[in-house]
Structures are given as C-alpha cells and as structure tokens.
Image (cartoon, grey):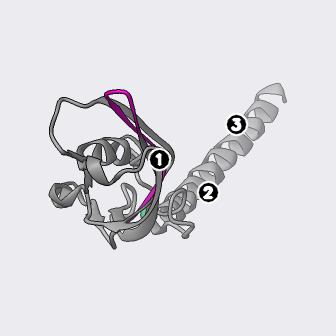
Amino acid sequence: MKLHLRQIPAEGQHLEGETDCPIPDLAAEKVTCAGPLRYSLDVGITGHALWANGSLHQPVTLECVSCLQPFDYTIDVPAFAIHTELAGPETVDLMPYMREDILLNLPPYPNCARHGGRVCKAATVETTVDDAARAEQKREADWAALDKLKLRK
Ligand SMILES: [Zn+2]
C-alpha cells in the first residue's frame, strides 16, 4: 500500500479501506488470508517524517495446533503506529510496516477453542483420557485404603 506524499495535505489525512494480504508467503505455516487487510489510519507529514496511526484487521484462516483443523480468526492491530524519516522518494510503502505488526499479533500457538471460539476436538479427547486416568487413580487409592485396613487387622 503506497502513499503518495504529495497527495497528503498539510493537516493530515484519514485513510480507510482495504489492501492486499501482507502475508501471502505464510501458507506453509498454515496461515492464509481469508480476505483483504482492512485499515483505518490517520497519516500526515511533519518536517521530514511521515507518521501514521490507526488500526488494522486481517481475517485469516489458521490451523489449530491441537486438532489440526482450520478455523477463522481476525488478527487485530488496535494501535498501529509508525513514524519514519522521509529519505526523498515520492512514495512510501506502508506494506512492510503493516506486515510486521500483523506478524507480531499472530497467535504463536493458534488454538481453535481459545482463538476461534469453537469446541476443540482434541481438547474433548484429552478430557476423556484425563477422566479415565483420574478414575483409575481413584480406584487404586481405594484399594490402597482397603489394603491398609487389612494390615491393621
Ligand atoms: Zn482445535
């Protein structure tokens, strides 16, 4: 997303819209864009610097680390802010900055229950196993109690 510096008025400008997915190369990591990047930004030029702040929203499809099922998630960057010195070119590409903040806000261990509001199938299986293990331990504890009683006699 390129900004044409000459088109930015002295008092700054509010920009809202959609632009291309900034992370098209993450398909191998099971992160794919499910739509365009939405932005709402205030931009301006102060001296020889460009500043921008606002919010970014990137809908993605992630893969759950537990059940390996894909689920929808929106990466929110509520406080996107940059301040960069202008080196002379007439355009500044915001995409590298947006990409960096999107990556920073990507869940490192996506989980469909925690991030997707779903019931994770893997979690259900784990719970069942845990319950069985607990029941087994309880049974052993009961037998141990019985054994002690026998010893006392
Ligand atoms: Zn899951």
Q: Nearer the viewer, mark 1 or mark 2?
A: 1
Find residue 120 and report its horizontal and vertical position in percent: 50, 66
Magenta span contains residue 102: no
Residue that appears at 26% across and 63% down: 21
Q: Is the magenta stretch mostly helix, strand or loop?
A: strand
Find residue 125 and report its horizontal and vertical position in percent: 49, 64
In the image shown, does 57 or 15 lie closer to the viewer? 15
Q: Mark 2 points at which residue?
A: 131
Q: Name the residue under label 1.
A: 12
Q: Can residue 112 be seen in this view?
A: yes
Q: Is residue 60 visible?
A: no
Q: Mark 3 points at which residue?
A: 144
Q: Which amino acid does label 2 sit on?
A: Asp
Q: Circles 3 and 1: CB distance less than 8 Å?
A: no
Q: Is 6 drawn above or below residue 141 in the view shown?
A: below
Q: Which of marks 1 and 2 is nearer the N terminus?
A: 1
Give the distance between the C-alpha atoms of the residues marked 1 and 2, in whole angstroms.
60 Å
Q: Earlier in the sequence, mark 2 or mark 3?
A: 2
Give the distance between the C-alpha atoms of the residues marked 2 and 3, in whole angstroms.
20 Å
Range of residues picked out in magenta: 45-60
Q: What residue type is labelled 1?
A: Gly
Residue that appears at 61% across and 57% down: 131
The quarter of the image holding the N terminus is: bottom left
The quarter of the image holding the C terminus is: top right
Write down which quadrant ligand 1 falls in: bottom left
In the drawing, does residue 89 fall left or right of residue 40? left
Q: How crowded is mark 1: few (under 14 residues within 10 Å), some or many (20 or more)?
A: some
Residue 81 image label: none
